Image: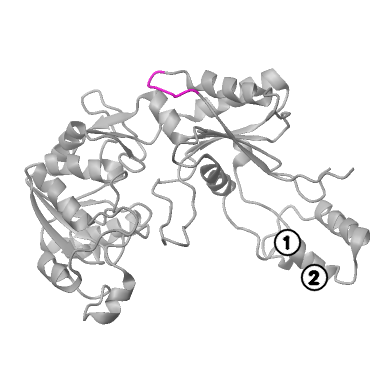
Amino acid sequence: MARLVGTVSRGIRTPIIREGDDIVRIVTESVLAAAEDPDWGFRFRDRDILCMTEAIVARAQGNYASVDNIAADVKAKTGGKTVGVVFPILSRNRFAICLRGIARGVEKVVLQLSWPADEVGNHLIEEDLLDSVDADPYRDVLDIKKYRELFGYRVHRFTGVDYVDYYQKLIEEEGAECEIVFANDPRVILNYTKTVLACDIHTLPHTKKLLKEAGAECLLGLPDIMNAPVGGSGYNEAYGLLGSNKATEESVKLFPRDAQPIVEEIQKIIFDKTGKRIEVMVYGDGGFKDPMGGIWEFADPVVAPFFTEGLRGTPNELKIKYLADNDFGALEGEELKEAIRAEIEKKDADLVGKMASEGTTPRQLTDLIGSLSDLTSGSGDKGTPVVYIQGYFDNYSTD
């Protein structure tokens, strides 16, 4: 009988992972045990993919930083006087504890918020409100008084939080003076201070370029904070505070570091145990946008910071519906099936620019697989921080 199943993505339950745990042992034992489950088991195959969340890797590494660590680093690198904090995302999980540390390390924070939404789509105000007020986010600079006059006290539709009020109170609780400005040109901050901490994620290089050219004297980004140990803390030399998550009210978990040996060791152990060469990766946020809330669910610096070599590159796929409607439009049934299978088997190694590949996804494999894994594992109480994917590299011609 012809094969009827394509890609399968399985969430794998593991023990709760703590600092100092042997992540390689726990992940490999969990996957091997899942394969033997009498009801949910599976057979290992070459080119299966084992994915694990960045959170369990960072937790096992103990890669944490306290608010005091952040404050000390910010003070040392900025001088601890007035600091402009530009374009932070609106998030209790992703930025609030970082902001607490920034405020604890300085005398004054000038907080510049983009409006009507942050970089990843969290809205301060609904865009429909702009139709009824005389305000242009591409032109106008608002202070807190004008913002309140125009829009009042708006709460986030999902969290119920007024982030303007929340961030202001958080800064002031740390003993720092707070001034808030709303503007979408990062250079506006230079009217208040020449010491700037740019806090955007994916637009950070452009923001820093504009600020540097406009005369910022001390210019940092979140990757420049906690990029080395402070008082024995964790750190991430590449991303600093980017990709961090709230751990407690006084600490954050940083993005994992030095995990390439981990993915390669897991690959080796699985091969030694099963004789199958699988691919392994560490993943964070998936690179997708929520159509209902308009939020881009991607607050990490990259989807997959560490992965084995077989996951490098982009898909090279033909569009079956294109072939069925065009090249083989006169065929039906088994004849159509065999014609498409034969076309797939002889496809070029590089289909870039070919009409038959039009509409396939031109994204990195790790971004696609990471998104699939993130959706499979979820971010709540599923308890499946490891995802095992089979059949991802197969196609319609694979038996």
Residue identifier under label 2: 325
Res 319 label = 1
Image quadrant in which the C terminus is located:
top right
The kind of residue tagged 1 is: Lys
Residue 348 appears in the picture as rendered:
yes
Mark 2 surroundings within 10 Å by alpha-carbon count, few (fewer than 14), some (14 through 19), many (20 or more): few
Residue 349 drawn at (x, y percent): 74, 52
The magenta segment: 15-20
The kind of residue tagged 2 is: Asp
Q: Earlier in the sequence, mark 1 or mark 2?
A: 1
Please determine whether, in this image, residue 16 is positioned above or below residue 106: above
Residue 84 appears in the picture as rendered:
no
Residue 169 drawn at (x, y percent): 13, 49
Q: Secondary structure at mark 1?
A: loop
Q: Was residue 110 drawn as part of the magenta stretch in this picture?
A: no
Residue farthest right in this picture: 335
Q: Secondary structure at mark 2?
A: helix
